[in-house]
Image (tube, rainbow, N blue to C red):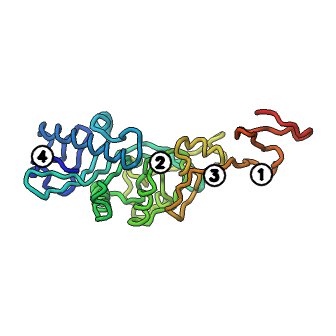
């Protein structure tokens, strides 16, 4: 996306880092630049929403100011007094309860990918991977350490192509965690941040009562808990990135009592009287 701003003296690097005060790293006192960044972030956020077919942008200058997120923005300078933005990635730390593949619960502050957009005319030219690598190098993490908020099919394919990440561990929410997130090497453990601000720096917490019960995967309960993004809740693992499927059929959670589970013509669950085989609403 092209902008008629002459900020060549500011955008000396290909990637700009913008904090929640709308300031570019290294140019915190430049108030005029803040106004320029406000306009650019709003326009790029709208373009990202259109690309993802969202009703409203999830990235804007107002949202950024009211958060602790940060944006990495990739730029081009082909002509004097001509400024082009290729794309951006929005990141932020969040405290999440996580489940590994054994259904053990843990709590950690995880670095989350919240929005990722490369302009349509610049896609498939290496800009996206350069932007991602720049961000990862800046924070000292690997791609496997990220949680991704509501990833698109295209983004999941991107993660597989460049980082060979495809096996998802169901979290029961909108965030996607890859199986490799829980694979700690001895070197990573030795370098673990004692504050817990590393994605792999987590410790399993003891669970009691209903939280300690075995977590059944691919059940109707998980689909309901997943709210609007059930496509990611359905699969515990994914070996094929082309897996997004929004068609779900009601599943019998107790197959051993098949005769007690039934749905009516409207799709609602119906309980059957095992003695007389009469139908009654739950």
Q: Residues at badges 2 and 1 in contact (C-beta under 8 Å)?
A: no
List the residue tagged with mark 2: 175
Q: Is residue 194 visible?
A: no
Q: Secondary structure at mark 1?
A: helix
Q: Is residue 200 left or right of residue 129?
A: right
Residue depth check, mark 3 versus mark 4: number of the one nearer the observer: 4
Question: In x, y percent, where is residue 46?
Answer: 31, 42
Residue that appears at 52% across and 55% down: 244
What whole-number distance in Å separates the C-alpha atoms at marks 4 and 1? 64 Å
What whole-number distance in Å separates the C-alpha atoms at marks 3 and 4? 51 Å
Question: In x, y percent, where is residue 122?
Answer: 27, 59
Q: Secondary structure at mark 2?
A: strand
Q: Residues at badges 3 and 1 in contact (C-beta under 8 Å)?
A: no
What whole-number distance in Å separates the C-alpha atoms at marks 3 and 1? 14 Å
The first of marks 2 and 3 along the sequence is 2
List the residue tagged with mark 1: 255
Residue that appears at 41% across and 54% down: 146
List the residue tagged with mark 3: 218
Question: In x, y percent, where is residue 136?
Answer: 32, 57
Residue depth check, mark 4 versus mark 1: number of the one nearer the observer: 4
Q: Residues within 10 Å of mark 4 (few under 14, many from 20)?
A: few
Query: Which disc, if any, is residue 5?
Result: 4
Question: In x, y percent, where is residue 19?
Answer: 25, 42
Residue that appears at 9% across and 48% down: 6
The first of marks 3 and 1 along the sequence is 3
Q: Residues at badges 4 and 1 in contact (C-beta under 8 Å)?
A: no
Q: Secondary structure at mark 3?
A: loop
Marks counted in the figure total 4
What whole-number distance in Å separates the C-alpha atoms at marks 2 and 3? 16 Å
What whole-number distance in Å separates the C-alpha atoms at marks 2 and 4? 36 Å
């Amino acid at each position: 996306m092209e902008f008629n701003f002459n900020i060549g003296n500011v955008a000396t690097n290909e990637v700009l880092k913008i904090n929640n005060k709308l300031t570019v790293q290294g140019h915190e006192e430049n108030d005029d630049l803040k106004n320029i960044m406000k306009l650019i972030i709003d326009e790029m956020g709208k373009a990202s929403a259109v690309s993802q077919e969202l009703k409203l942008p999830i990235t804007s200058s107002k949202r950024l100011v009211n958060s602790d997120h940060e944006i990495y923005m990739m730029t081009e300078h082909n002509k004097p007094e001509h400024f082009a933005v290729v794309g951006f990635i929005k990141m932020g730390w969040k405290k999440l309860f996580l489940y590994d593949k054994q259904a053990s619960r843990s709590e950690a502050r995880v670095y989350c990918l919240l929005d990722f957009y490369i302009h349509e005319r610049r896609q498939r030219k290496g800009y996206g991977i350069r932007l991602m690598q720049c961000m990862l190098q800046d924070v000292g993490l690997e791609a496997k350490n990220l949680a991704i908020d509501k990833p698109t099919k295209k983004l999941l394919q991107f993660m597989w192509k460049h980082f060979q990440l495809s096996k998802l561990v169901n979290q029961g929410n909108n965030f996607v965690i890859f199986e490799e997130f829980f694979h700690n090497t001895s070197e990573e453990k030795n370098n673990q941040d004692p504050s817990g601000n590393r994605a792999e720096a987590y410790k399993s917490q003891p669970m009691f009562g209903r939280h300690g019960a075995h977590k059944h995967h691919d059940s109707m309960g998980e689909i309901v808990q997943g709210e609007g993004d059930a496509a990611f809740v359905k699969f515990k693992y994914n070996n094929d990135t082309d897996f997004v499927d929004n068609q779900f059929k009601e599943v019998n959670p107790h197959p051993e009592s098949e005769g007690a589970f039934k749905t009516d013509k409207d799709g609602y669950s119906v309980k059957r009287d095992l003695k007389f085989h009469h139908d009654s609403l739950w």
